[in-house]
Image: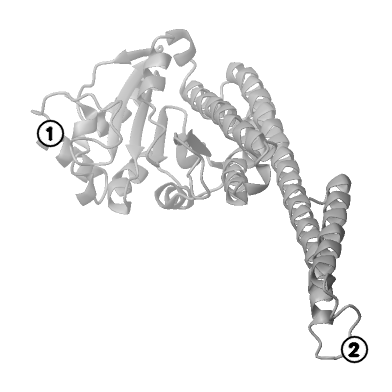
Amino acid sequence: MSMAGNLRKVTSLGGVGGLRKVARLARRRPRVDLSHPARSPLGSSVVNCVTYRDGVRTPARGDLVDTVQRVRKSREGFVWLGLHEPTDQEFAGIAELFDLHPLAVEDAIEAHQRPKLERYGETLFAVFKTVCYVEHEELTATSEVVDTGEIMLFVGADFVITVRHGRHGSLGPLREELESDPGQLAKGPSAVLHAIADHVVDDYLTVTDSVQGDIDQVETDVFSESGARTDPGRIYQLKRELLELKRAVVPLSRPLEDLATRPIRAVDPEIQAYFRDVSDHLLRAKEQIAAFDELLNSILQAHLAQVTVAQNEDMRKITAWAAIVAVPTMVCGVYGMNFDHMPELHWRYGYGMVIGVISAACLALYRGFRRSGWL
């Protein structure tokens, strides 16, 4: 029997008693593997619910309430409950069962939180921003480059509750990877907390590497022969997407530092050393983002300089042609005046001479402008 299936009708829960009723209704349902789908095929927000003992996944027996009570009575193992975008009603019974603080529950349901780490009694509440690189054939001024989501964790002595928001960031593969290392998983809920933090930060590095490809392409286009005609909206779009990535990465520094250095009852001392490694990876991601931001500023300044130079070249060409055209305009304007005694006005060769003078003057100006690079 699947404990995830036991929570299928959790929307109607009013407390722990409701959880027991739902469990009895779902006992005859076949076991469903809910590790990978974004939402449960049973229609609730429950993605998976598993019990671990000595780092090994144990068969589900009874409903969620019985399982939690059995784990707490034996003081061995822990429960990992995974949720995806739960509603208030879906989370009510769970919050009561695990005695979760109302403020943390509100944050977990509403999402859109900054990365943070908070302690409510014996429970640790952590928020991570997940990121995903959005593939695109060509970067445009409206291309989405970085998609973000959130993972919230409630970590206690004998339970881990993960709440995901967003279209990506499935923890199914991570769960399988953890299960392949029972020694690490035997260290308790804090091992899950570390694995998720490490997974999220590794995704930061993956996304920054992908974003670097877009920045390199924009840089190549800007410094090409047609760089002045590059759409500056592409650069601004990259800066906006980079800002979104920065909002996910930078605020996480303080929570990881606390997890790595400060004694926290919910975190196994052996796990704290692993958080220092995660913090180092986060520092690398921060440095890359800062470097990308500076590089994009330089690319934008170079592009603006190219546009200015191109405009100056156009103005010089216009000025040069205006100077050339001014010669025949001036001569023709003079001889267009209605006076009887104009020099050479009635001379037989006067017209040819004027045309020759105009042509020679225009040719001299043209060659002069060509030598100076104005044309």
Res. 94 image quadrant: top left
Figure check: 370 above or below 183: below
Distance, label 1 to label 2, CA atoms, is 115 Å
Q: Residue at coordinates 53% horizontally, 41% vertically from top-left?
A: 121
Tell which of 132 and 64 is nearer to you.
132
Res. 177 image quadrant: top left
Q: Residue at coordinates 54% horizontally, 31% vertically from top-left?
A: 207
Marks 1 and 2 close (CB-CB < 8 Å): no
The location of residue 350, given as percent across then percent down, is 84, 72
**Outermost residue to the front:** 348
Q: Is residue 45 visible?
A: yes
Relative horizontal placement of residue 362, taking residue 160 as reference (left or right): right
The location of residue 363, given as percent across then percent down, is 83, 54
- Report which residue position mark 1 lands on: 26
The location of residue 347, given as percent across then percent down, is 86, 76
Which residue type carries mark 2?
A: His
- Report which residue position mark 2 lands on: 341
**Element under label 1?**
loop
- Closer mark to the observer between disc 1 and disc 2: 2
Res. 282 image quadrant: top right
Q: Residues within 10 Å of mark 2 (few under 14, many from 20)?
A: few
**Outermost residue to the left:** 28
Which residue type carries mark 1?
A: Ala
